[in-house]
Image (cartoon, rainbow, N blue to C red):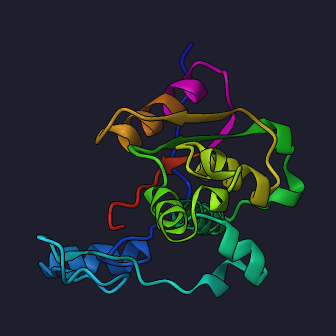
Amino acid sequence: MSKRAVVTGIGLLTPLGNSPDEFFDNALRGLCRIRPIRKFNASGLPVQIGGEIDLPDDELHLSQRQAADMPELAKWGVMAARRAVADARLNLEAEDPYAIDVILGVAAPAFDVFQAQAIEIREKGAGAALPQTPVMANPAIAAIYIGRYLGLHGELTNISTSCSSSAVAIGYAARQIQNGDATCVITGGVDEGVS
């Protein structure tokens, strides 16, 4: 028999708003948050606009080193997951950490990691390459950090099906619950396309 799957918490980080209410209100108003890129100097590029997320690192409550070592993709995933857990009023300390899964959709790897490494290698030579680059740029890095920083030890699944990654992850999570293979899943998606 199929069990019911319900959404109990939402965590959003988007150019259109960083909370469900802000996002929905701005969408209803037809607000556009596409603007000139501020993350880096895009003046020499053919496309100089994009939708960027404005969010301070201090919301993560990490040391400067931890924040510097974490790709933007992972930061946003952890922040959104924490917000979803808070919105659901889920007390993770009272739950079995082995019974909560993380199923995340990510369309592309952390391009900011590759970009930073390419610049370092161009400026300083091949010796500047960091051995952790393949791990940090792994599309699963956001799911890994969510599990790590939320103290979860359940199944960790990364789904990468291009633009449909987030929707497929949510559908897969619902099926896991409906089939009795999971009882609680943190799911959704995260991508970073401006780099």
Relative horizontal placement of residue 136, taking residue 97 as reference (left or right): left
Above or below: residue 4 compared with residue 12: above
At a point 76% along the width and 77% down the height, the residue shown is: 65
Foreground of the two, 176 or 81: 81
Above or below: residue 91 compared with residue 179: below
Above or below: residue 63 compared with residue 143: below
Indicate the quadrant containing the N terminus: top left, top right, bottom left or bottom right.
top right
Q: Is residue 103 visible?
A: yes
Q: Residue 95: x and y, percent?
A: 84, 49
At a point 87% along the width and 43% down the height, the residue shown is: 96
Furthest toward the front, the residue is: 125
Above or below: residue 28 compared with residue 36: above
Please tell me in which quadrant of the rendered image residue 184 appears.
Answer: top right
Tag count: 0
At a point 79% along the width and 48% down the height, the residue shown is: 152
Q: Is residue 62 visible?
A: no
Please tell me in which quadrant of the rendered image residue 12 appears.
Answer: bottom left
Q: Residue 162: x and y, percent?
A: 32, 37
Furthest toward the top, the residue is: 1
Relative horizontal placement of residue 108, taking residue 3 as reference (left or right): left
Foreground of the two, 55 or 193: 193
Please tell me in which quadrant of the rendered image residue 146 appears.
Answer: bottom right
Foreground of the two, 33 or 30: 33
Q: Residue 53: x and y, percent?
A: 39, 77
Magenta span contains residue 175: yes
Foreground of the two, 187 or 147: 147
Indicate the quadrant containing the C terminus: top left, top right, bottom left or bottom right.
bottom left
At a point 19% along the width and 84% down the height, the residue shown is: 43
Relative horizontal placement of residue 113, taking residue 149 as reference (left or right): left
Q: What span is colored magenta in the figure? A: 174-185
Q: Residue 7: x and y, percent?
A: 51, 49
